[in-house]
Amino acid sequence: MNEKKMIIRLLDKRFAGIDSELLKKPSQGWIRTIREALGMTSTQLARRMGLSQPRVIQMEKNEKNLKLATLEKAAAALGCRLVYALVPDEPIEEMLRDRAREKATELTRKVNINMALENQQVDSSAQIDELAAELLSRSLSALWED
């Protein structure tokens, strides 16, 4: 197994262990939810962060637009750590296979248009599978060229 495939499989294994429910943002946002769970007022959090109380309220309302540095500062003030991750919706290996098949289908379709003019279409299903496997064996970045 080549190094890239091994890395992809390790990532997929790691992502498979993540509970997606756990990562869903609470309706009031993480900062306010944790602050309230700790029994901390917005004034107390503001003091711990070196900010004004209205700024903390604004921060809680606009949490999704905060910079990572601000989120880290809020997390530290709440006795937490910020965890930042991009979690794929499906295994990376599956995403690559689907994308290769998509590209292979498009390439085969283009070839078949020309071949149809000469009544020489190819068996597209087998052709697509073979081409997809070939695309996966090449540079993966080529899969994302449009």
Image (cartoon, rainbow, N blue to C red):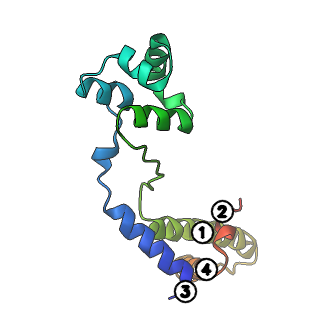
* Residue under the point 44% across and 31% down: 74
As drawn, the label of residue 131 is 4
- Picture coordinates of residue 13 (x, y %)? 37, 70
- Picture coordinates of residue 63 (x, y %)? 47, 27
User: Crowdedness of circle 4 by 10 Å Cα count: few (<14), some, many (20+)?
Assistant: some
Q: Reading the chain from its start, which is encountered first: label 1 or label 2?
A: 1
Q: Reading the chain from its start, which is encountered first: label 1 or label 4?
A: 1
User: Where 132 falls versus 59 (above or below)?
Assistant: below
Query: In the rendered image, which residue does mark 3 sit on?
Result: 2
Q: Reading the chain from its start, which is encountered first: label 3 or label 4?
A: 3
Q: Which SS class for mark 2?
A: helix
In-front residue for pair 16/119: 16
Q: Is residue 29 visible?
A: no
Amino acid marked by disc 1: Thr
Instruction: Give the alpha-carbon distance from disc 3 to disc 2, as whole Å.
Output: 20 Å
User: Where 47 falls versus 122 (above or below)?
Assistant: above
As drawn, the label of residue 144 is 2
Q: Reading the chain from its start, which is encountered first: label 4 or label 2?
A: 4
As drawn, the label of residue 105 is 1
| Front disc: 3 or 2 | 3
User: Crowdedness of circle 1 by 10 Å Cα count: few (<14), some, many (20+)?
Assistant: some
- Picture coordinates of residue 107 (x, y %)? 67, 70
Q: Is residue 74 visible?
A: yes
| Front disc: 3 or 4 | 3
User: Where 14 falls versus 133 (above or below)?
Assistant: above
Q: Reading the chain from its start, which is encountered first: label 3 or label 2?
A: 3
Amino acid marked by disc 2: Trp
- Picture coordinates of residue 46 (x, y %)? 43, 19
